[in-house]
Amino acid sequence: MEGIVYAVLLTCKATHDSIGWNPTYALPGVRLPQFGAALRDLDTSTEEWPLELKVLRLLIGPAEDGIATALERCNRWPDYREISKDQPGPPDSHAAALRLIETVPPELANHRERTVIQVGEQVAQMLIQDGHDCFEQWFFFDDRWAGAHPDLAASLIWFAYHWDPLCSRPHLYLTPCSDNRIRYVAVVGEDGQAYVREAEPRDEPGVWDLRRWSYENRPPGDVTTGEVLGTVEIKLQEPSPDSGKFTEFEITRTRHGQAVAAMLARHVLRDLQRAGVARITGWLPDDSRYPHGRRFLRMLGEIHKPDDGRSVLVIR
């Protein structure tokens, strides 16, 4: 079947309630007039979908082909923020979802009367008021609309993922766009071996697990595919073109720690040499709070301690 529908959700769940970090979802083989029926009859897993899409699917009626009426019902959903025991998650049927929106209305502070819904033949949008003077924006458009408005479609898709239209870096959530930070991760591959590469947004959960395990005991057992065993972030050309400084350093407390430190050091050393960085100033992970930090630094170069007491790592 021809056609494809794109779902772009500009939600306010990112860091500091900013727009961003929302992947675009695409359903091939359908266009917008039949999008509701296609969602309702979909027989693949939607476990990875955001709550908004799950709710929209549940609120499509048995005889509805489009999504106009379902979007009106979505405006009555109690809360789209993080689900907890006090916030209802999506039920398991259309009838149960209808009962929920009838019995659990949104909080008055959410001001859903301000929501704007517009549905056309090839594009639909909902600006839904969800409290805190914040309008979340839902866009659904098909390939015909995208073909007629290629720049706008591409801009919407990019803006959903990243608030800065001029930034093309695949950096993590809390990394600023505007400086020369590079983050590396040591990740377990499909073959069970660890390898080092630059970090990508999909590594964020693994990086946070790694940080958590620096305060808690890591669960016992072997490492798993995709697990982050170590991470290093360096800010280059700071404070001068030939220098840099570490901004993050963590290595898991496992039997793999020494090997991970060595792998990260070899990879980082190569890139520092290519970038013309001769020394690292400022913070160095060289004390007991950072397991394997001394081994990592020794492989990069030699630590000098000037009279002012501030250590400097001279790159080999």
Image (spheres, rainbow, N blue to C red):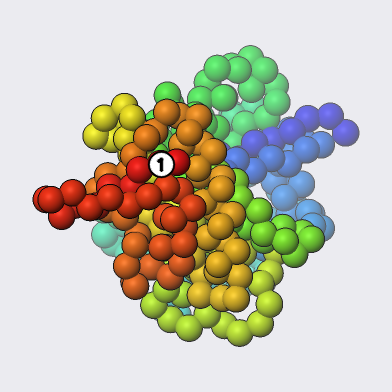
Q: Where is residue 14 in the image (x, y as percent from the top left)?
A: 40, 51
Question: Who's the residue at 39% across and 77% down the image?
Answer: 215
Name the quadrant containing residue 131.
Answer: bottom left
Question: Who's the residue at 22% across and 52% down the image?
Answer: 305
- For mark 1, what is the residue? 315
Q: In this view, does 206 lie above or below 200?
A: below
Name of the residue lying farthest toward the top: 148
Name of the residue lying farthest toward the right: 1
Q: Position of residue 116 (x, y in %)?
A: 41, 39
Count of residue discs: 1
Is residue 158 visible to the viewer in this orientation of the structure? yes
Q: In which quarter of the image is the N terminus?
A: top right
Is residue 71 visible to the viewer in this orientation of the structure? no
Question: Who's the residue at 42% across and 47% down the image?
Answer: 301
Q: Where is residue 226 in the image (x, y as percent from the top left)?
A: 65, 60
Question: Who's the residue at 57% across and 83% down the image?
Answer: 219
**Disc 1 element:** strand
Q: Position of residue 155 (x, y in %)?
A: 51, 25
Q: Quadrant of the C terminus?
A: top left
- Compare residues 237 and 293 and report the one nearer the observer: 293
Q: In this view, does 147 lie above or below 69?
A: above
Q: Is residue 13 left or right of residue 91?
A: left
Dot 1: few (<14), some (14–19), or many (≥20) neighbours within 10 Å?
A: many
Name of the residue lying farthest toward the left: 308
Q: Is residue 109 left or right of residue 66?
A: left
- Looking at the rendered structure, the kind of residue marked 1 is Ile
- Compare residues 270 and 122 and report the one nearer the observer: 270
